Amino acid sequence: MRGELKTAIVLGVAIAVAIAAMSAYLSGFESEPVVPAAPGEPIDKSGFRTAPSIVGIAEYINTTPENLSQDIEGMVVLYDIWTYSCINCLRTLPFITAWDEKYSDQGLLIIGVHSPEFEFEKDPENVRTAVEKYNIEYPVVMDNDWETWNAFENRYWPRKYIADHEGYIRYDHIGEGAYKETEGVIQQLLAERAAAMNEQMPTNGELVDIEAFQHTRSRTPELYLGYQLAFGRQQIGNDEGFRPNNIVEYTAPDALQTHMFHMEGTWHNGPESMRLESAEGAVHLVYVAKEVNIVAAGSGTIQVYLDGEPISPEHAGAGVDGHTVTVSESDLYNIVTSEAAGQHLLELRVSGPGVEIFTYTFG
């Protein structure tokens, strides 16, 4: 590949600060939790909406429609709207599975509402594989047509709604974070349920002890390689640009723009991804972050180069073996994991016609 690309870092970090600040704001947005009433005082729920019915489900995992309908009754229900290739969703799963283990016998029911971002996430086998991979034992419903997503009037991944034992939504959180606050709400609503049903509630208020991922304040925003998902965003740095549903021979420019991807080789422009058509190709990116992930599909290999050299063990992500990523399933692959954020040149040298790259995400 082009040796001159090693030094082709031409824009500063200033743009990243503004973009990443907005991204961090949105990912951390949450509505205010309900302030619990004092013990013994009635709770005015006139201002709360009730949780909508789960509708339009293509597949039920770890449950059946009949069992789920029965299990919801009288339970505190955490609805987790997620999709399995979303890194923000995956970072929340250790907390959610820990809450399931800790509180499921005390009246908490967790329902994973899997609302896909990409077509491959509609495949039941892919979702079942992810459910097993992440040790999810609570019910997961495949909301392939976003009917339940729309019933909740949702717009984000991940999002957590918590309904009390009477079905009123008492808490709503968008994105990662606020784990202590969320668990505190779970405990409060379980206490309300226990009081209403004259049951004993364990008094231990300890929270699960899991280290949360720490985002960098300045980082490259998510980049979409599919023309449909990238609509309205200037994210491709090639002069050829996007050419919807066409096969394009790309030449990477000598000067790379920060926070934009630059294709090399022959690629098919799909609505969700770029698919390699030539035997080899590459994607060049100058980014700012400490972590880089890609969503990829197909069958082939990706050689990872960081700042012009094969990526070192110090920076290689969990999806990298040596400096190679083997793409064998439609999934998220962790490419770079560093201790601190920095500006770097990342080159993915792709081998294997049919390999698709959907998106880059950063942390």
Image: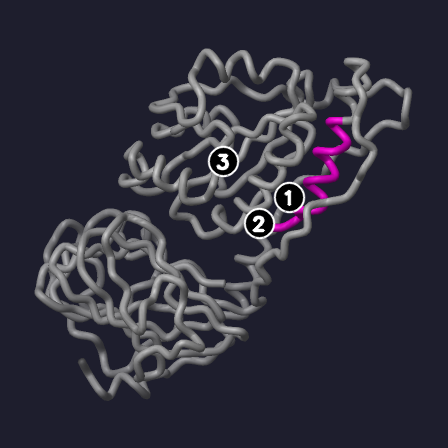
Look at the image and tell me in which quarter the N terminus lies: bottom left
- Per the model, the C-alpha gap separating discs 1 and 2 is 10 Å
- Per the model, the C-alpha gap separating discs 2 and 3 is 12 Å
Q: Earlier in the sequence, mark 1 or mark 2?
A: 1
- Count neighbours of disc 2 (C-alpha within 10 A) and say few if under 14, some if 14 to 19, many if 20 or more: many
- Count neighbours of disc 3 (C-alpha within 10 A) and say few if under 14, some if 14 to 19, many if 20 or more: many
Q: Which is closer to the viewer, label 3 or label 1?
A: 3
* Residue, disc 2: 176
Pinpoint residue 192: horizontal percent, then vertical percent: 78, 23
* Residue, disc 3: 81
- The residue stretch that appears in magenta: 177-190
Identity of the residue drawn at 22% across and 87% down: 3
- Count neighbours of disc 1 (C-alpha within 10 A) and say few if under 14, some if 14 to 19, many if 20 or more: some
Residue type at mark 1: give it: Glu
Pinpoint residue 256: horizontal percent, then vertical percent: 31, 78
Q: Nearer the viewer, residue 135 or 340?
A: 135
> In this view of the protein, can residue 160 be seen by the observer?
yes
Identity of the residue drawn at 65% across and 26% down: 105
* Residue, disc 1: 30
From the viewer's perspective, is residue 273 above or below residue 125? below
| 104 left or right of 248 in image | right
